[in-house]
Image (tube, helix red, strand yellow):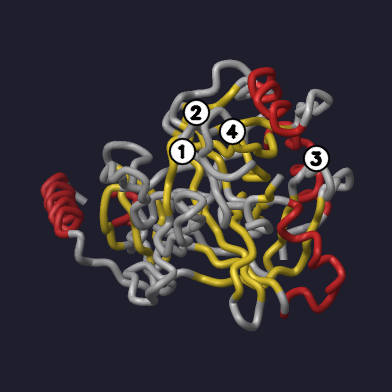
Amino acid sequence: MSRRIVCAGGGMAVMVAVMVVVMVMVRAQNEQENEFGCHCMEYWTCITSGGHPYSYCGLSASSVCCFVPLNASPIGILPLRNTKKSCGTKGADTKKEGQAEMSEWPWHAAILEQPQDLYVCGASLLDEAWVLTAAHCVDDYLEYGDRLPGVLKVRLGEYDVSTTAEPLKHEEFPVTRVVIHPQFNNATLVNDIALLQLVKSARRKGNIDAVCMPKKNDFMEGVPARCYVTGWGRKDEAADHSVVLKEINVPIWSNPTCQTALRDQFGPGYTLPSTALCAGAEGRDACDGDGGGPLVCEKDKHWYQVGVVSFGIGCGRRNIPGVYTRVDAFEDWIKETIGVHHHP
């Protein structure tokens, strides 16, 4: 058994004129300024908030990615839309097989060990101050206590790890708290889930946003066909780690079928826990370097994190799926943990 990371917005004339200007600005797509924070909102709300529309973002046909300067002066016709409750809004996709686009999966995060910026695991942004990952990725860091912010950090908004010249810059946040599920078993990887609290809240923008969390049993029956796992892991067992975020469309297995397949590997006594789920197919699977990352599925035009990459036997082998921690099974624990530890 190999763990994925460790083992290997006046008059009608004025209104029309403003609308035309906005449409031209959106088409131009050249008003982006990196020091702004991008929020997905209706284009009229963007303009009346003193912002600059950049491109369509997908919440609706008229939603734009709006860059609002910190010193922006709202026009005062409409209030700034509250975007904090939005989640699971996927970025543009050119349908290139196996490779994500910049900002396509804005919740995907990387956990790094300081000071060398060593890659530890993948993760996902739940809200402005918390990320979700696998417990096996971070259990060794519990011993650092108050020294943790100097040891572990989370990088958000990353895409191509080989360059710093991306138009949307990544941001880094020291980790102030690691919370491992109390029933995590490092030997069997049961309850392989953990939460990391950031020293300060992240600001949502074009390449940084939160994934949606499923409620209990949301995806128990008939899991949607559009499910993806993302990460910088290997494409296959013999390949190098990817420098550009990759995406893999994976089928979801039923637990009984998965258990049967895994018994061929672990023996007839193996029991797949109800807190796990399986996904993958020959040539389509998470691999070394993807551990802790999100498995997401689409529902009502939003993306929900169904699983956390936990472990697998090799990568993409025939009739052997990858195993993921089932996120909806831990809904109560996630809510309670975040509720107890207030945002910084």
- Cα–Cα gap, marks 4 and 3: 16 Å
Of the residues under marks 2 and 3, which one precedes in the sequence?
3
> Label 3: how many residues lie within 10 Å, few (<14), some (14-19) or many (20+)?
many
Asked if the residue under mark 3 is in contact with the one under mark 4, i.e. CB atoms within 8 Å, the reply is no
CA gap between label 4 and label 2 equals 9 Å
Please give the residue where the numbered disc 3 appears in the rendered image. 190
Give the percent coordinates (x, y) of residue 257. Answer: 64, 19
The image position of residue 42, as x and y in percent, is 33, 45
Give, as a three-letter code, the residue at label 4: Pro
Distance (Cα) linking label 1 and label 2? 9 Å
In space, the residues marked 3 and 1 are separated at their CA atoms by 23 Å
Q: Few, some or many C-alpha atoms within 10 Å of disc 2 (few <14, some 14-19, many ≥20)? A: some
Is there CB contact under 8 Å for labels 1 and 4? no
Residue at screen point 35% across, 57% down: 102
| Position in image of residue 240 (x %, y %) | 46, 61
Q: Nearer the viewer, mark 3 or mark 1?
A: 1
Say if 257 sits above or below 26 in the image.
Answer: above
**Can you give x and y, in whole percent of width and height, for residue 219 in the image?**
60, 24
Element assignment for label 2: loop
Report the disc number at residue 284.
1
| Type of amino acid at the residue the image marks with label 1 | Arg
Q: Nearer the viewer, mark 4 or mark 2?
A: 4
Q: Secondary structure at mark 3?
A: loop
Q: Which residue is mark 4?
A: 321
Q: Which residue in the structure is indicated by mark 2?
A: 251
Instruction: Tell me how far mark 2 sits from mark 3, CA to CA.
Output: 22 Å
Q: Mark 4 and 2 residues: CB-CB less than 8 Å, in contact?
A: no
Which quadrant, please, contains the N terminus? top right
Q: Earlier in the sequence, mark 1 or mark 4?
A: 1
**Which image quarter: residue 239?**
bottom left
Mark 4: secondary structure: loop
